[in-house]
Image (tube, grey):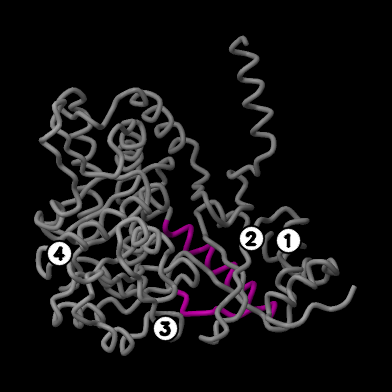
Amino acid sequence: MTIDDVLSLLEKAESEDLNPRTGRLFAYVYETGDENIRKVAEKALVRFAEKNLLDFTVFRSAVFFEKEVVGFARNLMHGDAAVGSFTFGGTESIMLAVKAARDYYRKKEGTAEVPEILAPISIHPAFLKAADYLGLKVVRLPVKDAKGDVDAFAEAVSGKTALIALSAPNWPFGTIDPVEEIAEIAAERNVLLHVDACLGGFILPFFEMLGEKIPKFDFRVEGVTSISLDAHKYGYAPKGASVVLFRDAELKKCSMFVDVTSPGYVFVNQAVLSSRPEGPLAAAFAVIKYLGVEGYKELASKILSARDKIYRGLKSLGFESVGEVESSVLAMTNPDVDLMGFVNNMKKLGWQLHLQKGLKEYDIPDNIHLTLSPVHDGVAEKFVEDAAKALEMEPELTLSRFTQWLKGGSLPKS
């Protein structure tokens, strides 16, 4: 095939995708609307795509880029002495934090017990995945007001506890777990505590700089021993960019894999993968340098503006927030609305929303989930206008039947 033929195939395949730049998608991408951010990221991504993070003695630029990206993340998390690693995503960052906790626990307690992770039911499934891969058990605890229940953690900590995992914020509700209170428990019991700030790590600090009241969740809290934060979310880097931070070098060593017995080269991995393209790291560096603190603050202010417009607009239509509104996520519910039908009607009007089933045993209702980006500030009024229209549109029968299943009721006869 010719180059033009191949490019034509790529264009045809892409035609099936929703355009992420329109502001009509509320998940998966974090769109700024700034073409210069995209331009600088793409140039860095392509320029370093062929270089391999496996051997920094050959590709010395990787050392510089990682130092800069990890350093920026460390400063955001107030980790003066913290050390960290660049990874290809939040799941990988969490995997390394869990490995560090497991190995640290084994050094301290031995290997007789299966180590446990204590986490709220709202924790990201990546912790369940990491536990499955690494031979740990996740003990999921109740939430109270859509946040981790402090009393439940105090009661659940045991000699088997290798790690407590909390979120800032959690994905389902956008609420920030009570890190300070639970960190006290962790410190008293000499248990490691990881904060999953993959979603909030590159946005909550800038909200705080803009005057928002954000509960402390980072290394300012004694007892927090590791943090994950994604540069490919509100760091606005292309996908494949995350950071895991550890309070000290001993913990980072526990996250690594080293083998010197091979007849080949010395095998040193500070991430899950061995060969990794340098492009995503270079792109994260480029975006961070292009934006700087002031650029990130400006984008954060647009998210706050969009959040205010959409939140007030949905409230005027009878929706309420599932939990406290304190991040870039809205989880909105309305007991008088067929949410499945509403989401489908919004899709007909060009909007892509998430529907969440909720947790009835914790009084968390079905809800719609909106992850807000800077681009949404320019379309917020139109979103609310279309939401009002969607409420007036008739939902499809099949969707209503499925909604009955979601609510735990019996399916109506067709």
Query: Which segment is the magenta one?
Result: 300-325
The first of marks 4 and 2 along the sequence is 4
Q: Give the residue displayed 37% in from the left and 26% down from the top.
A: 49
Hey, which quadrant is residue 165 in on the image?
bottom left
- Whether residue 405 is in magenta: the answer is no
Contact flag, marks 2 and 1 (Cβ < 8 Å): yes
User: Which mark lies nearer to you, 1 or 3?
Assistant: 3
Question: In the image, what residue occupies the spot 72% across and 75% down?
Answer: 405
Foreground disc of the pair 4, 2: 4
C-alpha gap between disc 2 and disc 3: 26 Å
Q: Which residue is mark 1?
A: 346
Q: Name the amino acid type tagged 3.
A: Pro
Give the mark nearer the N terminus: 4 vs 3. Answer: 4
Q: Mainly helix, strand or loop, the magenta region?
A: helix
Which residue was labeled with disc 4?
106
Residue 142's disc is 3
Q: Which residue is mark 2?
A: 353
Q: Position of residue 230 (x, y in %)?
A: 36, 52
Label 1, label 3: how far apart the Cα atoms are: 32 Å
Helix, strand or loop for disc 4: helix
Q: What's the distance in space between the residues labelled 2 and 1, CA to CA?
A: 8 Å
